[in-house]
Amino acid sequence: MLDENEIILQLNTRVRRLKFSADIEHLFREFYYNRFLIERRFALALGLIVFLLSGLLDYYFVIDAIEKVVVLRYFIVSPIIIVCSCVVVVKQLSRYQQQSLAVMVICLGLTLVMIISLAPHSSSLLYFTGIILVLIFGCCLCFIRFRFALAVVGVIGLAYNLQMQLDSAYSLSTVSAHNYFYWGAGVLVLGCSYLMEANARATFLYEKLLKKREQGLKDANESLALQASKDGLTGIANRRHFDSKLANEWRRGIRDSHAVSLVMIDIDYFKKYNDSYGHQQGDICLQQIAKTIAEYAKRPGDLAARYGGEEFALILGGTDTVEAGRIANDLLGSIRRLAINHNDSDVASVVTVSAGLASIFPGGEKSPEQLIKQADQALYHAKGAGRDQVSISQ
């Protein structure tokens, strides 16, 4: 994942230079390949059709050398265009896309230069216009990147000038005029290619930056949601999360026809503990108890929560009364083994808890509120029966 500061640095310093750092450049090439793939396919198909149909003009303007032109156009250059087009559109060969486009356009341009050398001077202007169209086609419609467009314009331009130098029939004024229009068109085409690539590079970075910030916002929202669902002191689920989880497990119990068990837990004589040891030590005690309860919420359907004050709750989704009773009794033993001193307790010298257990198969007129009520009643019974024990709702 790209760092946001690195993206901004590349955006401010590298876009105009049309060159990113190596790791980002690799990602940009993949982006550039996919971004204009449909347009390139259309342009290649259109270009091939126009190139093949243009052969009809050869029979009118280059009739004296028609055999050479036909061989050149249809048996040499057309296969090259088809091969290059295949390379451009095949995903596995995407790394050679720009090189293939450049080779194809150069071949088109050189073909027209060679036809000009075979055609009467009266027809040369037609094919010269074709060379300009080839530049526009390759650099603008096929989205050739700037450095490859520079090679295309340079190679075709030098080849055309060489052809004019070898043909003594071209006057200086004709050569000058052709160069003026060719290089003028070349500069315009290169400017277009530069702007398109620079814009594509900026778009690529802005998209990366947007995704980065969207991910940051998503992470922040998830963090806030997590904080909103946790108890600030103990770090386990709060009452809001408890209500939501119980409702979800209730619906799952209806769907899967299994029981939902709830253990309500209350610290024995916690007010006396606070009065004797202080509220700071009381908070530490709550944190230790909460951590121990959380260790028993092992499955996706389980949840340990602080219900309020010194009262906790343990949801055991898909757990029947027998298994839930075993878990509750093990939990009480684990809390005793914490050996948190409580000299003012009437049941033990260490902190203990009382627990009320209720299990219900959801459905019919039963509700989560009924499960909570039964567990609360069982907890009340456990406290009335001497505390430090589990009472199971019947």
Image (cartoon, rainbow, N blue to C red):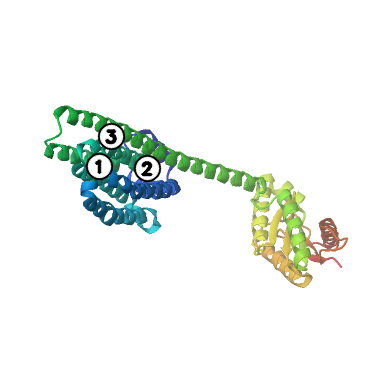
Res 143 label: 2
Furthest residue to the right?
Answer: 365
* Visible residue check, residue 287: yes
Furthest residue to the top?
Answer: 173
Mark 1 secondary-structure assignment? helix
Spatial distance from mark 1 to mark 3, Cα to Cα? Answer: 11 Å
Q: Height in image: 75 above or below 204?
A: below
Precedes in sequence: disc 1 or disc 3:
1
Spatial distance from mark 3 to mark 2, Cα to Cα? Answer: 15 Å
Mark 2 secondary-structure assignment? loop
| Residue bearing mark 3 | 186
Splitting the image into 4 quarters, where does residue 197 fall?
top left
The residue sitting at 60% across, 47% down in the picture is 222
Compare residues 177 and 371 and report the one nearer the observer.
Answer: 177
**Three-letter amino acid code of the residue under disc 2:** Phe
Q: Is residue 258 rendered to the left or right of residue 189? A: right
The C terminus sits in image quarter: bottom right
Q: Height in image: 336 above or below 51?
A: below
Compare residues 236 and 349 and report the one nearer the observer.
Answer: 236
Say whether marks 3 and 2 touch (CB < 8 Å).
Answer: no
| Residue bearing mark 1 | 151
Precedes in sequence: disc 1 or disc 2:
2
